[in-house]
Amino acid sequence: MAVTLIYRSVRGIKNHLPYAKTDKYVAIAFIVALYLQLILGLIMFTNLGSGFDFQYIPDESNNMVAKRLWPVEHIVLMLFALFIANLGLISSFLTEKSQSRFKKVLIYYSIAVVLIAISLLSIYA
């Protein structure tokens, strides 16, 4: 969704296209996908019924810090990304001109995608 949205925004700015219903629906679908990911992520974070918990093992105390730090960092960055994407959707709805809409969507959603990428890359760093 994000790639499609950014591509349509860049194409709309370059070719001076009108902001179509398809652009609006893709932006809304991206927000809906983010909310679904939030709900599923919270369900997975609680580990309902999995039997997995953070037990203290003295030899793996360094891993305990990583297990505690990553979920907090990930949740905070993802919530910021969701907040920024919502701001982009609202500001694009309040704007009248198509070029301004495309620019706002491109800026806000690109920031949200960068935050999501940073959050996911922190897993592997």
Image: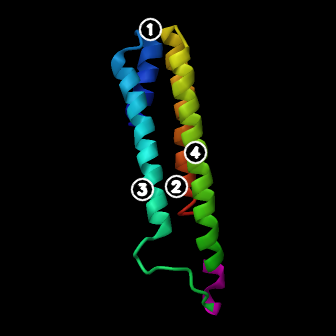
User: Which label number is shown at residue 40?
Assistant: 3
Label 3 Cα neighbours within 10 Å, binned few <14 / some 14-19 / many ≥20: few
* Residue position marked by numbered label 1 in the rendering: 16
User: What's the distance in space between the residues labelled 4 and 3, CA to CA?
Assistant: 19 Å
Q: Earlier in the sequence, mark 2 or mark 4?
A: 4
Q: Callout 4: helix, strand or loop?
A: helix
93, above or below 35, in the image: above
Q: Residue furthest bottom?
A: 58
User: What's the distance in space between the residues labelled 2 and 4, CA to CA?
Assistant: 9 Å
Q: Nearer the viewer, mark 3 or mark 2?
A: 3
* Residue position marked by numbered label 2 in the rendering: 120
Q: Callout 3: helix, strand or loop?
A: helix
Horizontally, is 112 left or right of 10 in the view? Answer: right
* Residue position marked by numbered label 4 in the rendering: 115
Q: Earlier in the sequence, mark 3 or mark 1?
A: 1
User: Which label number is shown at residue 116?
Assistant: none
Q: Earlier in the sequence, mark 2 or mark 1?
A: 1
Q: Earlier in the sequence, mark 4 or mark 1?
A: 1
Label 1 Cα neighbours within 10 Å, binned few <14 / some 14-19 / many ≥20: few
Q: Nearer the viewer, residue 31 or 116?
A: 31
User: What's the distance in space between the residues labelled 3 and 2, CA to CA?
Assistant: 16 Å
Image coordinates for residue 16, horizontal then vertical, percent: 44, 8
Mark 1: amino acid: His
Q: Quadrant of the N terminus?
A: top left
Q: Quadrant of the C terminus?
A: bottom right
86, above or below 97, in the image: below
Q: Are dots 3 and 1 in contact, CB under 8 Å?
A: no
Label 4 Cα neighbours within 10 Å, binned few <14 / some 14-19 / many ≥20: many
Q: Are dots 2 and 4 in contact, CB under 8 Å?
A: no
Which secondary structure is most common in the magenta stretch? helix
Q: Nearer the viewer, mark 3 or mark 1?
A: 3
